[in-house]
Amino acid sequence: MSLIPVKDALARILDGVTALEGERVPLADGLDRVTANDIQALRTQPPFDASAMDGYAVCSVDFPDGVDLPVRLKLVGESAAGHPFSGSVKPGETARIFTGAIVPDGADAILIQENATVEGTTILADERITNGQFIRKRGLDFSKGDSLIAGGTKMRPRHLSLAAAMNHADIELVRRPRVGILATGDELVPPGSKLGPGQIISSNNIGLHGLVKRLGGTPIDLGIAADTKASLAETLANAKASRLDILVTIGGASVGDHDLVLGALEREGMNLGFWRIAMRPGKPLMFGRLDAMRVLGLPGNPVSAMVCAEIFLRPLLRARLGLDPSRLASRAITDGDLPENDKRQDYLRARITGDKDGLRIVTAFSRQDSSMLGNLARADCLILRPPFAPVAQAGDPVDILLLDDV
């Protein structure tokens, strides 16, 4: 199977992907979750004409053009938040009122307290008043039935506050995708282990666990499978039983004698979509479908695995959440020369080192080996070099993908 371009690979991975079904979630647990449909207001806000200031509820007819100040008004009651005035305000009268309180019947404006003088039960109005002054009319913010939060919205704190004001105790959100993460290889041991001859720490599954969680999925650790048909068959059977939406395997999908993952998946019934892709790092990338589960087989090299996850797993997760999977590159300036590229799309680990004319300045690391996690951890962006890109000299524009731009 020949190498396929990154663009074509991503199109195949996303082909036919739709958002998962919705589920009712308590509002307090909805942060960063995605709405499954439009959310409508269950009430009107404010539900009554409310005072926007502390002061006095008055009738604007007491303040005709040319009236001499101060205007004398009789104090007849008080309206506080949660404790409305049960009577009404007639011309020549006023009621003490506080911010958020119901405007009493008959009153149509608010005299702010700074412009009032109190003489026992008489209030002297020291300013002219117009109809509607300092009153928040019923429904100023929204009315019952208004659609205020669209489906496909990622719920930020401001959206949660609005949904609460709309009187929702729970809302329907897209179910979090269940993502199984399976590391493979006899050489792998968990972090904290004492290493034996030829063994290395399994790090990719830890990084992918964090990426899946950060992007809104539910990561499920499937452990480390040995390089045997029996171990892989047992682990894949567990994966199928776990009702996964996405299965991510790490390593074992290349062409060596010990790379058994592809064969194991095909024996389980996976329909292979492609294997091997024209990108660096990450050529041995596999994609297939196993029943309703989408399968991504990432390379075993740690940088390759994480870069491929950024390019392919991230948009797949977003699509399953009902979010736009597209990811636009940002324009930047390289502060060093970059060599001519070959037929594979390249993702150079780089750091943002400055700013010029509104564009970021980026520095590619001199060593780009796909085993160097230290460089990836220090990177905050990837410089995207398309196939056959010519030499880029210091000061030339380049495209970058921000690694922390969720």
Image (cartoon, grey):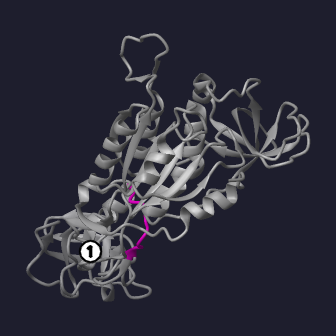
Most common secondary structure along the magenta stretch = loop
Is residue 105 visible in the rendered structure shown here? Answer: yes
* Whole-percent x, y for residue 34 in the image: 38, 62
* Whole-percent x, y for residue 390 in the image: 91, 44
Between 257 and 184, which is closer to the camera in this rendering? 257
Q: Residue 30 is drawn in which quadrant?
A: bottom left
In the image, residue 316 above or below residue 365: below
Stretch in magenta: 148-156
> Is residue 247 a member of the stretch shown in magenta?
no
Q: Residue at x 42, y 73 (%)?
A: 150
Q: Which residue is mark 1?
A: 50
Q: Residue 377 is drawn in which quadrant?
A: top right
Horizontal side of 191 relative to 48 (left or right) equals right
Horizontal side of 305 relative to 384 (left or right) equals left
Horizontal side of 33 relative to 13 (left or right) equals left
In the image, residue 322 above or below residue 309: below
